[in-house]
Image (tube, rainbow, N blue to C red):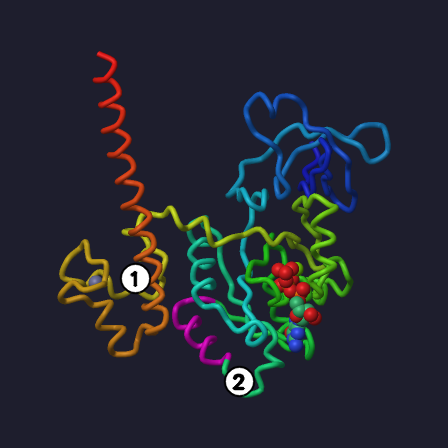
Amino acid sequence: LPHGIIIKGIGGFYYVLSGDTVYECKARGIFRNIGTVPLPGDKVEITILNEKNKGNIEKILPRTNELIRPAISNINQVIVTIAARSPMPDLLLLDKLLINAALKDINAIVCINKIDLDTAGEYKAISQTYTSAGYKVLPTSTRTEEGLQDLSRELKDKISVFAGQSGVGKSTLINSIMQCNIMKTGDISSKIERGKHTTRHAELIPLKEGGFLADTPGFSSLDIMTMEPDVLQDYYPEFSEYRGGCRFSSCMHISEPDCEVKKAVESGIIDTGRYERYLTIYRVLKENYDMRFKNQTHDKYNSKRNRKGKQ
Ligand SMILES: Nc1nc2c(ncn2[C@@H]2O[C@H](COP(=O)(O)OP(=O)(O)OP(=O)(O)O)[C@@H](O)[C@H]2O)c(=O)[nH]1
Ligand SMILES: [Mg+2]
Ligand SMILES: [Zn+2]
């Protein structure tokens, strides 16, 4: 059967790109029976109907991953975008988005956009920090077009999604790369207007050189908030070389004695800012975790009491 990829789903129809043609497909009941809803990003087998450019989805090939918000599967990478200026970089958000990507097994690239506004080149320190933490960093400007070719090269043959704070230039970057105006940019009022009247469905935009871009802003930092605090350190690539040397195997690298991670911070090998944001996120996760634990024991206690009450 012909293979294709779902690029969007609307009103019970799935649009499947196969070769150079987009087929409007229906998914048969079997998918509902096995509890699988086809998603943009799904690689599928289709049968082509006699009617022009119509087909049926017969099979969904195994997914490498699936996101819920946005509802997309088989994402290869997320381009976590910040602006060098306007808005000023929110590195805590950046770190959370990088953790979320790793949590979902998706490769992350850091894009520092609007470098044209940073005449002093302060973004270079950020670039340095994240490069030495183990990430690929791409400085870009849609004004001067600096870095856009490098970014395009990274997108080739992959399914990518952009993430990051509002106003950093995600849509403008997508438009520049596509050399068209698929995405609405800028001016807030027109965005609010659009939000009011249209439901947004995730859609994959085919790139000329191969690969797809998801046009959705959904990838959020909230998903990491229910993570167990103990595993947070797994998502810091720059800790991995040192944590094995800590005196305690349970070391969280906070105030434990003989902590190799802290030593690496003190000697400037691990970036102090990254480490401090690790502590900030750790505390929040710990608080959330303890709260859930407390509620659980509280619920148990209450249900026991209720049972007793009934006797
Ligand atoms: N100076 C400068 N401005 C830029 C650059 N890229 C985008 N902008 C401007 O930044 C503003 C916001 O850009 P958008 O592309 O709408 O930002 P976004 O990240 O898509 O924002 P949301 O859709 O709200 O998440 C627009 O006015 C763009 O013209 C850049 O490289 N340099
Ligand atoms: Mg946008
Ligand atoms: Zn340690």
Horizontal side, residue 236 vs residue 64: left or right = left
Q: Tell me where the magenta segment starts and ends, as one range.
A: 123-135
- Residue 121: which numbered mark, if any? 2
Front residue of this view, candidates 290 and 151: 290
Horizontal side, residue 288 vs residue 166: left or right = left
Q: Position of residue 14 (x, y in %)?
A: 71, 36
**Pointer 1: what residue?**
240
Q: Comparing marks 1 and 2, which lies closer to the viewer?
A: 2
> Does 124 appear in magenta?
yes
Which residue type carries mark 2?
Answer: Gly
- Pick whichever of labels 1 and 2 is earlier in the sequence: 2
In the image, farthest residue toward the top: 311
Q: Is mark 1 within 8 Å of ligand 3?
A: no
Which residue type carries mark 1?
Answer: Ser
Q: Which quadrant is home to the N terminus?
A: top right
Disc 1 to disc 2, C-alpha distance:
30 Å
